Image: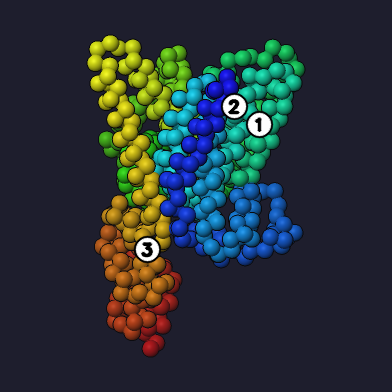
Amino acid sequence: MKFNKALNYILLVVLAVVTFLIYKNSLNGDFLIDDYAAILNNPLIHNLREFFSRHFSLRLGVLSEITLVFNWAISGSNPFGYHLFNVLIHIGCALLLFVLCNVIFKNTALSFLASLIFAIHPIHTEAVSWISGGPYAFSSLFFIAAMIFYVQSSQVTRNKHIFYLVLAFIIFVLCIFSGNSAVMLPVMFVCYDLFFREVQDKTKKIKGISRLVLFSALAIAGLFICVFFVNRNQFAHRIFHYRGLSYLVVIVKAWVYYLKILFLPLHRGLYHPFAYNTVNIMKFTPAFFLGLPLLCLVPFLFFRSRKFLKPVSFGIMWFFVAYAPYSNIIPICNIIAERYLYLPSAGFSLIVAALFLKSWEVINKSNARRALFRILALTALTLFLGSYTALTIKRNYEYSNIITYWETNIRNFPDGYLAYNNLAGTYYCLGQREQAIGYSWVNLMINPNQPHVWCNLGKVYREKGDLAQARYCYEQALKVDKGYFPAAKALEELRKR
């Protein structure tokens, strides 16, 4: 037992060091996109005493905001401290995942491999290397911690059982105040009780307390859904107009797309054109007809693996429960965002680790060519981990500055016109008008039905003194949208000159 504890501590240290080294190059990254509004141009977080005396209140996400307040007090406008905080939170999530797997499955090898895959997975860079993506990792830290205490409540004596339940509930509340992942934590508790809890409480008193905790958590989560997911995303209904089967099409195709970038995280960025083409995303395509039977197969795989390979079953449960808030069952503004996969990917990591170890077990039982198959298995695992590590390090570099970030998005998705627009706006803010004009034209070649882009382009031409070209751009904006007021006003001012 002492050896096992010592081994676990050593593996935790190794996991922390490896994770830090992989994300070390993200510490030099600059502020990007939403970071300006949330940090640099947000006076509410620039004074710690004033924040707590005038602006603090118990509201959703307030703990994430408090981290920015303290980061500003320590680092000010230096992005290093914010990046370091995100990396440390990610390390914490990887370590807690190791503990959770160990508590449930009592398998050190499985716990380490699953947490290692989670730590190095390239899909996490948006939640770690981008400062504004940090709340997704931050809330996941509380989510995993609450799950650890809830699981432990079934493995201890009666007195400690109540203690761990209370701790799980307290951390659940903290999760509520840190981010939106908390909404599915009570569901995770219930699913664990139904399918994976091995020790059942025998006394009615303890059962009553357990049910009280679960009922309270479910009630809070229900309120959370009403306040956050419905109110905050209500205009999504006006944007996408899901009706009938098209609603199901979006859900299935988004899930298939997430599976693709989870298994093969090669082409990544903030803007995935798949999600912003709101007409094509509602059409029946091969992706839909592939995804629908796969979704129907999931319950079979869940119950089948629950009998023969429990970690796989638990990983399936974890993925779908954590993924549910972003599945578009309740329409959300961003149909696809890599940061949404931060917590669900823990289930994916567990599945991959369990399947590899099962394969290793089968190889060791075989007498024929055992050495060869061991070499092949270790080579495959090395290539898998090595490729994920390389992709993560590369992606961290792509977050180094705003120009590199948008150029990478364009390289990965050449038809993603929104990235061209943002790169054009970035060059305009830097005073490089020719670059802004060039990227604006590329943007309009892909999608000319953007009155705001035509209007912005007209503004640049007007500042350059090319009034004829400016007039043409404003007229094009009005052809797209006759009621587009900024273009109409600008065109009227040109006619007066």
Q: Is 243 or 465 nearer to us in this picture? A: 465
Quarter of the image with the N terminus is: top right
Q: Is 210 or 381 nearer to us in this picture? A: 381
User: Given the image, on which type of amino acid does mark 1 rest?
Assistant: Ala
Alpha carbon distance from label 2 to label 3: 43 Å
- The residue singled out by tag 2 in the image is 189
Contact flag, marks 2 and 1 (Cβ < 8 Å): yes
Q: Is 125 or 176 nearer to us in this picture? A: 125
Q: Residue at x 45, y 25 (%)?
A: 109
Crowding near pointer 3: few (<14 within 10 Å), some, many (20+)? Answer: some
Q: Is residue 85 visible?
A: yes
Q: How is the image coloured?
A: rainbow
- The residue singled out by tag 3 in the image is 403
Position of 465 relative to 327 (above/below): below
Alpha carbon distance from label 2 to label 1: 10 Å
User: Given the image, on which type of amino acid does mark 2 rest?
Assistant: Phe
Contact flag, marks 2 and 3 (Cβ < 8 Å): no
Q: Earlier in the sequence, mark 2 or mark 1?
A: 1
Measured as percent of width and height from the top left, residue 316 is found at: 45, 26
- Identify the element where label 3 is drawn: helix
Q: Earlier in the sequence, mark 2 or mark 3?
A: 2
Measured as percent of width and height from the top left, residue 123 is found at: 41, 43
In front: label 2 or label 1: 1
Alpha carbon distance from label 1 to label 3: 43 Å
- The residue singled out by tag 1 in the image is 168
- Identify the element where label 2 is drawn: helix
Judge left or right: residue 419 versus residue 107: left
